[in-house]
Every structure is written in C-alpha cells, then in structure tokens.
Image (cartoon, rainbow, N blue to C red):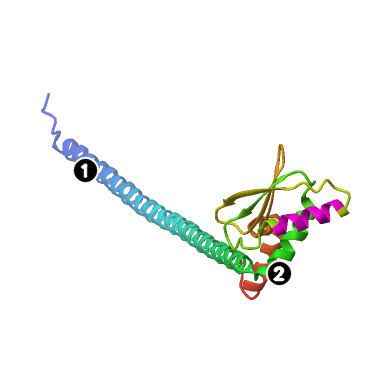
Amino acid sequence: MDSLNIHPIVQLIQEEAKATAEKLMSGARDRAAAISEYASQRVEEQKEETMARARGEADVLEDRMRRLAMLEVRKDLVAQKRALIEQAFEQAIDRLNATPQERLTAFMADLLVRHAQGTEEVAAGAVNDSFFTDGFLDAANQRLQQMGKPGQLILDDRRVPGVCGLIIKGASSQTHCTFAALMETRRDELEAQVASLLFADSTP
C-alpha cells in the first residue's frame, strides 16, 4: 500500500484548531471586556451610592449638630433669664427689707394679728428689726383681744438671721411673716409678671 500523505489533514486540523482558539480567545476577551465594563460601572454606581449616602449622612449630622447647638443656646438663654429673674427677686426683697420703720411696724402688726391665734411665741428677723419692741407686742395683744382672741403673745428675744419680719411659733407649727416668705408664696405669679417685664420683646 502506498503511504498516505497526511500533511494536508494535519494542516487542516491545525487551521481549525487555530480558528477555534482565536474564536475562543476573542469570546474570552469580549467577556473580559464586558465584565470589566460592568465592574467599572458597578464601582461607579457604588461610588455614587456611597457618596450620596455620605452626603445624606453628612446632612443628617449637620442638622443634628445645628439642633444641638440651638438647644445649647436656648438652655443658656433660659439660664440667663432665670438668673436675671432671681436677681430681680433678691433686689426686691432687699428693698422690702429696707422699709422705713413706721411703715414696717404697721405692716408687720397687721400680719401678726391676722395670722396669730393669740398664745404663740413671736420672734423677729435680724434684718431691720428695730420695730420689734415690747410695745409692739403689747399693741398686738390688745388688738387680738379686741378681735376675741386670747391676746397672750410672748416675746422671743432671739433673732432669726437673714430675714426681715416675724416668725410666729405655735406648739406644733411656725408661721413665717417675713418678706422673703411672702415673696415665695407668690413666686409663680410674680415670676410670670417679672419675666413679661424683663423679656417682653425677646424670644424664649
């Protein structure tokens, strides 16, 4: 048998293989390019999403910080207002404590006969206490008797520091007829009036 020339067959196979390989390589390159493009697109999308999320978070943080700052400003303003109101009350009490003796005597005598039962011990505050004499208490007892009360108030020589007025000491209770105590009993009402005068044109 004559030998068969297989060179054309081998060459054909090689060409087919090369063509197939080129086709496969071309497809792989196309897929790689598509994947790369998709990956780049996703990276950009994620980048934009991240930036948008970061901007949103930054806006939220900025708003939160602004609100906190405003809250601190409001707290400081309220504290300043409270301090001014407190100062106004202290000055008012100081002025009341300096009431001239004649007016102070009449005012305290009226308070005493209004609140006393007639058998208590009575002490005066140490501030502006010159009105509190034996004669003051005798006059109060006479008024109490005229009102149908015992009129047996007892003088307590000890002074109560830091206040101006009277302390009526019963068996189981005390009544403070001092300017500081009188201001405290109307504190809420007076604070609203003082605040309206001091801060009429300001925002809270």
Task: Tell which circle, 2 or 1, labels the residue nearer the N-terminal end.
Answer: 1
User: Would you say the magenta stretch is mainly helix, strand or loop?
Assistant: helix
Q: Is residue 29 above or below residue 11?
A: below
Residue at the (55%, 65%) spot, across then down: 87
Q: Which sits in the foreground, 126 or 151?
A: 151
Tell me, yes or no, whether the two marked residues, 2 and 1, touch with CB atoms within 8 Å.
Answer: no
**Three-letter code for the amino acid on which mark 2 is drawn:** Arg
State which region is magenta. Answer: 135-145
- Residue holding disc 1: 18
Q: Is residue 5 above or below residue 145?
A: above
Q: Is residue 44 left or right of residue 126?
A: left
- Residue holding disc 2: 103
Q: Nearer the viewer, mark 2 or mark 1?
A: 2
Locate residue 99: give its quadrant: bottom right
- The answer to whether residue 52 is magenta is no
Locate residue 165: give its quadrant: bottom right
**Three-letter code for the amino acid on which mark 1 is drawn:** Lys
Task: Please give the label number shown on residue 111.
Answer: none
Return the x and y of residue 10 as percentages of the image width and height.
17, 36
Residue at the (54%, 63%) spot, across then down: 83
Circle 1 SS class:
helix
Q: Residues within 10 Å of mark 2 (few under 14, many from 20)?
A: few
Residue at the (71%, 37%) spot, across then down: 172
Quadrant containing the C terminus in the rendered view? bottom right
Q: Is residue 65 left or right of residue 82?
A: left
Q: Is residue 162 above or below residue 169?
A: below
